[in-house]
């Protein structure tokens, strides 16, 4: 266990990323969201940001009929001009050729997108929509890639993925974050979405599901249970490492006692002043 000087400050919001991070490894959660250690940018993540921004620009400008593959590539150019000078891209250390290959891959993902949906038929009412509500003493927050409104007034939550789609037997388990978004829609907009939809651009897979009373109840119970576990861990400082195959992608291997058990690790705790 990593030693701390007192209770740790709780995160101010609960998000799908925080939930899944705590479930997969409490210590990694602590490094990321309590100690706020930097995580270096990686090309998959930055490419995801680039493609998401291009789709946001495509849907945010002009009339639906103008949402063509050519406009998508123009949106990608604009997204790249916004992103290319940032520290995030700088960390990737790409030379000219590397940058060209990086953008080309993003172009391929955008081209594949047009095989999955006809954007001229889509009626988005929210892009990168930031929804928040207070439940169980904490603010739940989610940023929805796209919220569509169907002709009959029903909502559909859409999330783009630029990584590989899961195997068929793991597909439904990837919808957890989308049920979180559906819950937020219900709380904030007063209407449960008819459907949540994950769109995997790389291998052109779409996974969807209809939220139900049972799935909303289950999501609420699970999220509150995880939040209670986070509160307990912040009170005791006991954030256990949970080694798994995900460790090979973890940015905190150098700080993790599970990776080097003989090396004691001390972190300076961000103790809540006078335990508040
Ligand atoms: S290396 Fe593995 S066990 Fe250690 S913090 Fe990262 S995910 Fe957790």
Image (tube, rainbow, N blue to C red):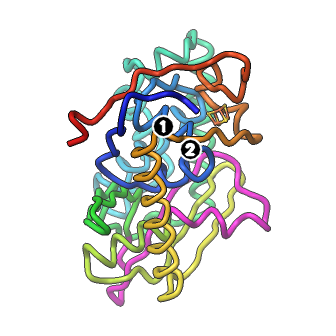
Residue 52: horizontal and vertical position, in percent?
Answer: 45, 46
Residue 45: horizontal and vertical position, in percent?
Answer: 54, 35
138 vs 185: above or below: above
Residue 64: horizontal and vertical position, in percent?
Answer: 35, 64
For image coordinates 66% across by 26% down, the residue present is 257
Looking at the rendering, in which quadrant would you find the N terminus? top right
> What residue sits right under mark 1 in the picture?
30
Callout 1: 10 Å neighbours few (<14), some, many (20+)?
Answer: many
Q: Is residue 77 left or right of residue 133?
A: right
Residue 204: horizontal and vertical position, in percent?
Answer: 68, 57
> What residue sits right under mark 2 in the picture?
26
Say which of 266 and 243 sits in front. 266
Callout 2: 10 Å neighbours few (<14), some, many (20+)?
Answer: many
For image coordinates 42% across by 46% down, the residue present is 71
For image coordinates 58% across by 55% down, the residue present is 113
For image coordinates 59% across by 28% down, the residue present is 43
* Figure quarter occupied by ligand 1: top right
The response on whether ligand 1 sits within 8 Å of label 2 is yes
Q: Which residues are magenta?
A: 148-177
- Count of numbered circles on the image: 2
Q: Secondary structure at mark 1?
A: helix
Say which of 251 and 65 sits in front. 251
17 vs 102: above or below: below
Looking at the rendering, in which quadrant would you find the C terminus? top left
Q: Are marks 2 and 1 in contact (CB under 8 Å)?
A: yes
Q: Is residue 155 magenta?
A: yes
């Amino acid at each position: 266990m990593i030693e701390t000087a007192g209770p740790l400050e709780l995160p101010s919001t609960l998000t799908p990323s925080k939930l899944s991070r705590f479930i997969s490894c409490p210590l990694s959660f602590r490094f990321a969201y309590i100690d706020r250690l930097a995580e270096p940018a990686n090309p998959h993540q930055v490419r995801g940001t680039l493609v998401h921004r291009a789709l946001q620009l495509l849907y945010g400008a002009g009339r639906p009929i103008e949402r063509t593959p050519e406009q998508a590539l123009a949106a990608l150019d604009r997204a790249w001009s916004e992103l290319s000078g940032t520290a995030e891209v700088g960390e990737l250390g790409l030379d000219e050729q590397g940058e060209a290959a990086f953008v080309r891959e993003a172009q391929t993902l955008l081209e594949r997108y047009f095989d999955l949906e006809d954007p001229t038929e889509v009626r988005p009412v929210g892009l990168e929509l930031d929804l928040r509500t207070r439940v169980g003493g904490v603010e739940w927050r989610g940023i929805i890639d796209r919220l569509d409104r169907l002709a009959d007034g029903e909502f559909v939550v859409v999330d783009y993925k630029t990584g590989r789609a899961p195997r068929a037997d793991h597909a439904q388990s990837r919808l957890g974050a989308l049920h979180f978004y559906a819950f937020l829609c219900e709380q904030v907009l007063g209407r449960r979405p008819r459907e949540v939809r994950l769109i995997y651009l790389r291998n052109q897979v779409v996974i969807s599901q209809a939220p139900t009373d049972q799935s909303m109840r289950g999501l609420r119970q699970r999220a509150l249970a995880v939040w209670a576990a986070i509160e307990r861990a912040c009170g005791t400082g006991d954030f256990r490492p949970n080694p798994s195959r995900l460790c090979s992608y973890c940015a905190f291997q150098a700080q993790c006692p599970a990776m080097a058990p003989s090396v004691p690790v001390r972190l300076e705790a961000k103790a809540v002043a006078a335990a508040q």
